[in-house]
Amino acid sequence: MTRGFWRDPDKYLATYWKRFPDVWVHGDWARIDEDGFWYIEGRSDDTLKVAGKRIGPAEVESAATAHAAVLEAAAIGVPHELKGEVIVVFVVLRPGHIAAAGLAGEIAESIAQRLGRPLRPDAVRFVADLPKTRNAKVLRRVIRAAYLGKEDLGDLSSLENPLAVEQIKEACLRAVPSRGRNQ
């Protein structure tokens, strides 16, 4: 827990202590399982809103990595006319697995089975690596901006592997559809 902001104690109190009386709100979702173990699920301000349902990208990524072929995953929300947002998942495959439309469909279906049909990803894209900081934080905002074709990807000074951004752009161009059509 932080003890304060440098030269701004009022901002510290407003940021962490004013939302709920006597509760420190740090911005992460957490859960406690039946054995008393705590799990950090991801940022509370990083929420996907799909057809009126709210879910954190970490939950989608956890469901994706539950598939035997998936080593790593990153989920983003992209605008959709009817649903507000749809989920697009970028996956890094485990060695021995090959990117194919059938596998993309399997991964999407696996996520839907774990989270519910309305949260089935609209697309699954295969990449060799995900853009990360030096301390291995996946930069979802960069993935989303690259996916949406934005020229300005924002501050990339903490990016450890810039080639991953190019791979995401390429993956969108040569997309393997997860539902039998190119999306």
Image (spheres, helix red, strand yellow):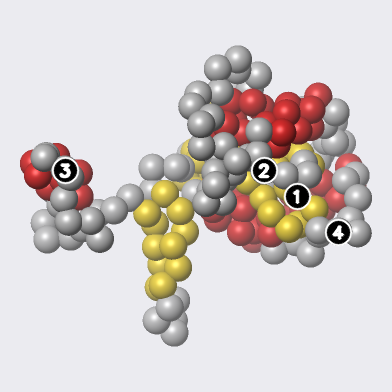
What's the distance in space between the residues labelled 1 and 4, CA to CA?
Answer: 9 Å
Residue at the far left: name it: 10
Instruction: Pick the quarter of the image with the C terminus.
Output: top right
What's the distance in space between the residues labelled 1 and 3, CA to CA?
Answer: 40 Å
Q: Secondary structure at mark 4?
A: loop
Q: Secondary structure at mark 2?
A: loop
The structure residue drawn at horizontal position 55% and vertical position 55%, both measured from the top left corner, is: 59
Sequence-wise, which precedes: disc 4 or disc 2? 4
For discs 3 and 2, the disc positioned in front in the rendered view: 3
Sequence-wise, which precedes: disc 3 or disc 4? 3
Within 10 angstroms of label 4, few (less than 14), some, or many (20 or more) residues?
few
Q: Residue 22 appears at what percent x and percent y? A: 12, 61
In contact (CB < 8 Å): disc 2 and disc 1: yes
Within 10 angstroms of label 3, few (less than 14), some, or many (20 or more) residues?
few
Left or right: residue 69 compared with residue 11: right
What's the distance in space between the residues labelled 3 and 4, CA to CA?
Answer: 47 Å
Is residue 86 at least partly visible in the picture? no
Q: Secondary structure at mark 1?
A: strand
Left or right: residue 171 compared with residue 48: right
Amino acid at circle 4: Pro
Q: Which mark is residue 60?
A: none
Q: Which residue is mark 2?
A: 130
| Foreground of the two, 129 or 84 | 129
Q: Which residue is mark 4?
A: 95
Q: Which residue is mark 3?
A: 6
Within 10 angstroms of label 2, few (less than 14), some, or many (20 or more) residues?
many
